Amino acid sequence: MQANLLEGKNAVVTGGAAGIGRAIAQAFAAEGAGVAICDLDYDGAKKAAEEIRSDGAIAKAYETDVSDWESVMQVAEKALEDFGVIDILVNNAGITRDNLIIRMSDEEWNDVLDVNLKGVFNFTKAFVPGMLRRRSGKIISIASVVGIMGNAGQANYAASKAGIIGFTKSLARELAPRRINVNAIAPGFIKTGMTEVLGEEQKSALSERIPLSRLGEPEDVARSALFLASELSDYITGQVLVVDGGMVM
Ligand code: NAP
């Protein structure tokens, strides 16, 4: 086994400017990977890449809207030019637009499905040809426990995350003959900008529902992504790794 888990590998992380994506990019870089950080928030992506470079690793920022195929194709071209080969794809970018179904607008439905699910399709389509040619690769998509158990007020988000799980299993079967592993991670409640809106009372009520009695840190998810990106998980495909302190079991 290599001293560093991802030595010589290159990874693309969508939504890598903040939260879970940023922690994944940092964890991968710390294990020797070159990292392409793709985000709508270009300033945030540049900052994240600079931070990684200041630790002596390789990182580059790209402005991307994962829901826009043209934008994805342009970034894929640039990233492949810069890095040569992309071995690992982490589909992490995601948004919420919560509402009860009777109030949910077409826009709220479409925005969430476009970013969370079509974004996964777009990035996978852009990077899978190189993986197919090399007969190796790791694709990891960030779903959610909400895609498994549902959540009132999040029908759009839950549908997008359940969609990611179906996409992952289908693609795992399709790409297994070319030795490309396709897995998903289903985080529970993780402390990021996405969950910042929750009040302290809501957070402590949530913690009571979590067997490990705490909300997760972005690094908790990043370590699982590292495992799924490395050769430690070579015999694992089509799985959903739940990282939620034991909430769903
Ligand atoms: P976050 O802190 O909000 O970070 C998400 C990043 O994605 C932001 O930098 C955001 O940029 C970017 N992004 C949003 N829309 C994009 C687009 N169209 N194209 C490219 N980048 C885009 O979220 P997070 O909590 O780290 O979530 C990361 C992933 O984990 C998401 O898929 C989320 O659904 C999933 N997840 C999170 C939790 C949780 O508790 N936090 C639980 C389960 C699953 P802007 O800031 O410009 O929007």
Image (cartoon, rainbow, N blue to C red):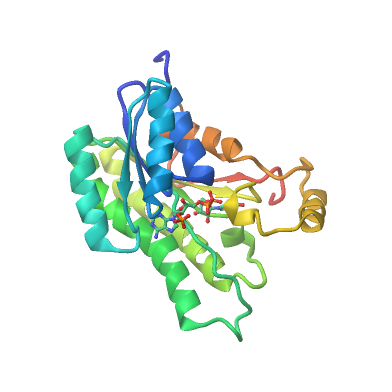
Residue 216's spot in the image, x, y percent?
66, 42
Q: Position of residue 134 (x, y in %)?
A: 20, 35
Q: Quadrant of residue 11?
A: top left
Which residue occupies the extreme bottom position in the image? 102
> Camera-side residue: 120 or 58?
58
Instruction: Name which residue lies at 82% across and 56% down.
Output: 201
Is 62 displayed left or right of 190 in the figure?
left
Q: Residue at x 47, y 68 (%)?
A: 112
Q: Nearer the viewer, residue 53 or 159?
A: 53
Residue shown at the point (69%, 51%) measured from the top left: 248
- Look at 59% across and 71% down and name the residue there: 98
Residue 32 placement (x, y as % from top left): 38, 22
Q: State whether residue 234 appears in this view.
A: no
Is residue 69 visible in this depiction of the protein?
yes
Determine whether 126 is above or below 46 in the image.
Answer: below
Q: Is residue 202 left or right of residue 248?
A: right
